[in-house]
């Protein structure tokens, strides 16, 4: 976790009053979820939209829109998806135009502010947050997230997303978490102490990768149809599976302006299955380089989290694919939308005073 020292805060004293609101934020490429110490839990699509002109501003009567609201009105908006591969877009790019860098940073800042507002802090209440980011995010990526949070959070700690999942489940020893988001799949092995760099792997084969695979497969299956990646993503979120048996997946796309139904069951299975092999290879790397005395414990305690864990049968598919590597036991979390945010909130509760970085 990234942190620096701050003073004047005692979490045990705070337990006697409500002057500080703790929040755990899973800042994701596709969705941002927040869990707060006042019991509020909210999630929003990580989409930010600004009215394009005076007409759209008059129509929408707002300066900024978020989530599904932004998607619904996107033709009237300049739309930003400010997180890419789980970090702020262009935060580690030297070739990006400065306007693009600043625009995505501003959109990320607005998204974090919106997420915190959903937690309904009281007027004057301090907000201390733990924010999850990809396991191998660079120092510059993490600093960009801190910068985006500067106007919203009074104190912040950055931690890896799979670590926050494991912490929330209290699986801190001999456990391997696979957190499948939209931009990245993050793996982290737990050994009873803070994970080191060699304990974590970040893959780009994740939800967006599956969307693009499905888009190409659907184009082959429906060559005359008109559709986009957003439409494919909606189908995936409703029907994603990797099992041999499944209900037919039927989609309706326009063909020269007329709706036509297509059966894309085989394409759905094939596209979703393409993340299994890279995940299994990463699991094998983390297991095979672990202390040999504890490798069996690790391989038999694999947890799948994140939005990708909702792909029907994925945990069993990973478990079966681990057979040639020595086998294993894999299960999915019960609350994929909030597992990361819940864990981040628990970290916030347990964080000692010296771990917080004062932003104000």
Image (cartoon, rainbow, N blue to C red):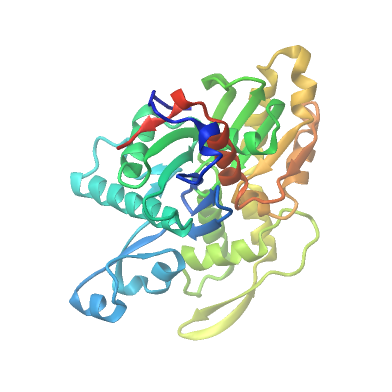
Tell me where residue 13 appears, x and y as whole percent. Answer: 52, 34
> From what the image shows, is residue 37 above or below residue 138?
below
Q: Pick the residue in front: 9 or 17.
A: 17
Residue 142 position within the rendered picture, expressed as x and y whole percent measured from the top left? 39, 33
Quadrant where the C terminus lies?
top left
The answer to whether residue 286 of the structure is visible from this angle is yes
Residue at point 59%, 38% (across, down): 346
- Observer-nearest of 346 and 297: 346
Residue at point 57% right, 22% down? 195
Query: Along the horizontal axis of the image, is 211 left or right of 99?
Result: right
Q: Is residue 199 above or below residue 292?
A: below
> Along the line of sight, which residue is nearer the eye, 290 or 318?
290
Side of 303 where 68 appears, left or right: left
Residue 194 place in picture, x, y as percent? 57, 22
Residue at the spot x=28%, y=51% of the render?
106
Q: Is residue 90 visible?
A: no
- Residue 83 position (above or below residue 324): below
Please provide percent x and percent y for residue 124.
36, 50
Direction bottom: furthest residue: 258
The image shows a total of numbered marks equal to 0
Q: Nearer the viewer, residue 199 or 265?
A: 199
């Amino acid at each position: 976790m990234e942190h620096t020292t701050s003073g004047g805060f005692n979490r045990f004293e705070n337990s006697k009053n409500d002057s500080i609101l703790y929040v755990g934020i899973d800042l994701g490429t596709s969705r941002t979820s927040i869990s707060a110490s006042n019991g509020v839990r909210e999630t929003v699509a990580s989409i930010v939209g600004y009215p394009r002109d005076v007409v759209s501003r008059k129509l929408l009567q707002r300066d900024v829109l978020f989530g599904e609201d932004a998607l619904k009105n996107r033709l009237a908006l300049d739309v930003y998806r400010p997180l890419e591969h789980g970090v702020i877009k262009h935060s580690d790019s030297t070739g990006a135009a400065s306007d693009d860098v600043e625009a995505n940073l501003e959109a990320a800042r607005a998204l974090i502010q919106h997420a915190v507002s959903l937690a309904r802090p009281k007027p004057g209440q301090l907000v201390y947050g733990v924010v999850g980011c990809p396991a191998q995010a660079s120092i510059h990526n993490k600093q960009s997230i801190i910068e985006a949070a500067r106007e919203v959070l009074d104190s912040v700690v950055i931690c890896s997303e799979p670590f926050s999942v494991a912490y929330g489940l209290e699986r801190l020893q001999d456990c391997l978490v696979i957190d499948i988001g939209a931009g990245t799949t993050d793996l982290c092995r737990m050994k009873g102490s803070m994970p080191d760099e060699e304990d974590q792997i970040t893959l780009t084969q994740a939800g967006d990768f599956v969307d693009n695979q499905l888009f190409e497969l659907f184009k082959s299956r429906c060559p005359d149809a008109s559709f986009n990646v957003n439409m494919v993503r909606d189908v995936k979120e409703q029907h994603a599976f990797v099992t041999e048996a499944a209900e037919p997946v039927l989609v309706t796309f326009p063909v020269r302006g007329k709706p036509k139904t297509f059966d894309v069951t085989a394409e759905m299975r094939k596209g979703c299955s393409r993340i299994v092999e890279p995940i299994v290879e990463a699991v094998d790397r983390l297991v095979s380089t672990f202390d040999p005395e504890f490798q069996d414990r690790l391989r038999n305690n694999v947890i799948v989290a994140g939005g990708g864990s909702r792909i029907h049968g994925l945990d069993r598919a990973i478990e079966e694919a681990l057979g040639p590597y020595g086998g294993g036991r894999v299960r999915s979390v019960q609350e994929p939308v909030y597992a990361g945010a819940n864990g981040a909130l628990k970290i916030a509760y347990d964080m000692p005073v010296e771990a917080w970085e004062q932003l104000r």
